[in-house]
């Protein structure tokens, strides 16, 4: 089955620690995205990547970093510089061509809690 | 900059009743519009999308939405709600240039038996 996998489903971190969230897709999609979801605020874009070895900051990139070394993978690192990292994180992907580039498919999410 | 407003934070309907969830957007060019549904603790599932053409679009699970350019709206409708439709619904607008989606704040749907 084609889809997007995110791991782990739940993640706990102590303050001051970096943590990496995994996102893998086997849909052969060119573009991948990371969103943060907080109650009552919808989804906010952290980073996105349209092709391998290239990525751009979204609306709330401070305190986060990403890499895109392989087409299938787009890991997100939440660094100690992120002041309020407790949230639900969603990864998405889409094909590269307009307009379908806008149609994004989502993974099941990772809930990060900072203790 | 694009934006999306979902005026209703929470809606409660009885099972079997009709449903309309409102969505208004702001975007300078032709919008690409989407409705997603999310169950608690889960990812988002695409219900339907509008790119061009017929302004009334059909989606999965019996949902439909109508694009009204004059009102900058893309409201989601269902003629008869089922208890399994209880979830949070998100409207989103896409920017054609690089696929960025801007989401509304979501509407939580509660269904009473």
Image (spheres, helix red, strand yellow):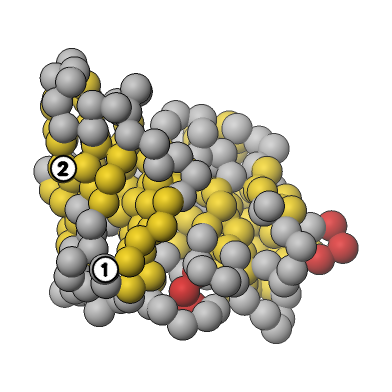
Q: Is residue A89 left or right of residue A46?
A: left
Kindly report which numbered mark, 1 or 2, lies closer to the viewer in this rendering.
1
The local secondary structure at tag 1 comes to loop
Comparing A42 with A46, the one in front is: A46
Q: Is residue B6 left or right of residue B34?
A: right
Image mark 2: chain: A
| 10 Å crowding of disc 1: few (<14), some (14-19), many (20+) | few
> Which residue is tagged 2?
A20
Looking at the rendered structure, whether the residues under marks 1 and 2 are on a common chain is answered as yes
The subunit letter for the residue under badge 1 reads A
**Of pointers 1 and 2, the one earlier in the residue sequence:** 2
In the rendering, at what x and y percent does residue B59 appear?
A: 52, 70
Task: State the image coordinates of residue A102 (x, y, percent, origin top left).
Answer: 50, 69
Residue B21: mark? none
User: Residue A92: x, y in percent?
Assistant: 34, 59
Residue at point 38%, 70% (across, down): A50
Residue B15 picture location, percent across and down: 52, 43
Q: In front: A45, or A90?
A: A45
Q: Nearer the viewer, residue A20 or B59?
A: A20
Which residue is at a point 26% across and 51% down the rendered structure image? Answer: A66
Q: Relative to residue B53, is residue A10 depicted above or below?
A: above
Residue at image point 23% right, 33% down:
A79
- The mark found on residue A53 in the picture is 1
The reply to whether residue B88 is in sight is no
Circle 2 residues within 10 Å: few <14, some 14–19, many ≥20: some
């Amino acid at each position: 089955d084609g889809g997007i996998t995110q791991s782990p489903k739940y993640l706990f971190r102590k303050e001051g620690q970096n943590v990496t969230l995994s996102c893998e897709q086997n849909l052969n999609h060119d573009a991948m995205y990371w969103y943060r979801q907080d109650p009552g605020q919808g989804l906010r874009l952290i980073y996105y990547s349209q092709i391998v070895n290239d990525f751009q900051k979204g609306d709330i990139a401070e305190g986060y970093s990403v890499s895109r070394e392989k087409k299938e993978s787009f890991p997100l690192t939440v660094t100690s510089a992120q002041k309020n990292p407790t949230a639900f994180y969603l990864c998405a992907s889409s094909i590269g061509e307009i307009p379908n580039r806008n149609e994004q498919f989502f993974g099941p999410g990772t809930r990060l809690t900072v203790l | 900059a694009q934006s999306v407003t979902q005026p209703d934070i929470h809606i409660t309907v009885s099972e079997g009743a009709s449903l309309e969830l409102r969505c208004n957007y702001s975007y300078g060019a032709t919008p690409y519009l989407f409705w997603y549904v999310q169950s608690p603790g889960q990812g988002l599932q695409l219900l339907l999308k509008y790119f061009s053409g017929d302004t009334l679009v059909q989606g999965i699970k019996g949902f439909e939405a109508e694009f009204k350019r004059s009102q900058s709206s893309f409201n989601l409708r269902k003629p008869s709600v089922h208890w399994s439709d209880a979830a949070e619904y998100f409207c989103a607008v896409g920017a054609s240039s690089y696929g960025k989606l801007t989401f509304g704040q979501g509407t939580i749907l509660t269904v009473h038996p």
